[in-house]
Amino acid sequence: MHAELLVLRFIHIVGAIIWVGGGVYAAFFLIPALLPNPSLIPQVMDGLQRRKVFVILPTVGLLVILAGIRLLWIDSAGFDDSFMATGPGRTFSIGGAAGIIAFLIQVFVQRPLGARLGKVAAALSGSPAPEERQRLTQEADRLRRRNGRAVLWAVIFGLIAATAMSIARYV
């Protein structure tokens, strides 16, 4: 049991640092740095895709969630009501729910928006007719704004999860 706890805590804590940290970096540094020059976005996204970032980060997020569920199961003796009604039990549960929401936003909102944005950006790079270029530019701007909001919400929920996990034992 001791070895399992060590492995689960390692996966949960280090994975969360990578997952939430990657989101914070993207939301507050990478995306704002790219917005003034949208023509760079396809190159950066292509580089990130070649490095499997869009596979690795959601996989890490899923592992963080699964490890967290198992840790809560162990801590609460099978989600026993007497533990879940305590301050730590409620706080871990709130943090877990926030982490799951962050993951769902990332996988079901951000990822599809990013894929659509990539297709629009590829069409724009093909020198379309002026009216088509204007339509595609407007579509790309709309998708960028929606994706930016999705990134921000995923990061907010990720930070709520991280905060809850870091204070739960003291609540």
Image: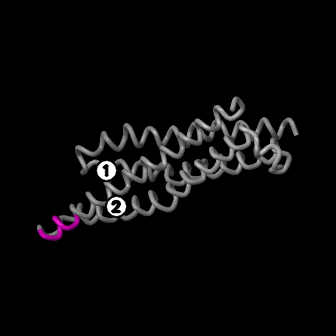
Q: Which stretch is magenta?
A: 131-136
Q: Residue 6, how many percent across, how many down?
A: 78, 35
| In-front residue for pair 145/171 | 171
- Position of residue 102 in the picture relative to residue 123 (left or right): right
**Disc 2 to disc 1, how far (Cα)?**
10 Å
Quarter the N terminus occupies:
top right
- For label 2, count other residues whose C-alpha is less than 10 Å away and answer few (under 14), some (14-19) or many (20+): many
Question: Amino acid type of disc 2?
Answer: Leu
| In-front residue for pair 126/168 | 168
Say which quarter of the image contains residue 126: bottom left
Is residue 133 a member of the stretch shown in magenta?
Answer: yes
Q: Residue 30, how many percent across, how many down?
A: 37, 41
Query: Residue at 44% across / 57% down in the picture?
Result: 110
Up-down relation of residue 161 to residue 50 (above or below): above
Query: Residue at 30% across / 44% down in the picture?
Result: 34
Q: Which residue is mark 2?
A: 117
Q: Residue 137, how many percent across, how many down?
A: 21, 61
Query: Residue at 32% across / 60% down in the picture?
Result: 143
- For label 1, count other residues whose C-alpha is less than 10 Å away and answer few (under 14), some (14-19) or many (20+): some
Up-down relation of residue 147 to residue 31 (above or below): below
| In-front residue for pair 91/14 | 91
Give residue 41's mark.
1
Q: Label 2's element?
A: helix
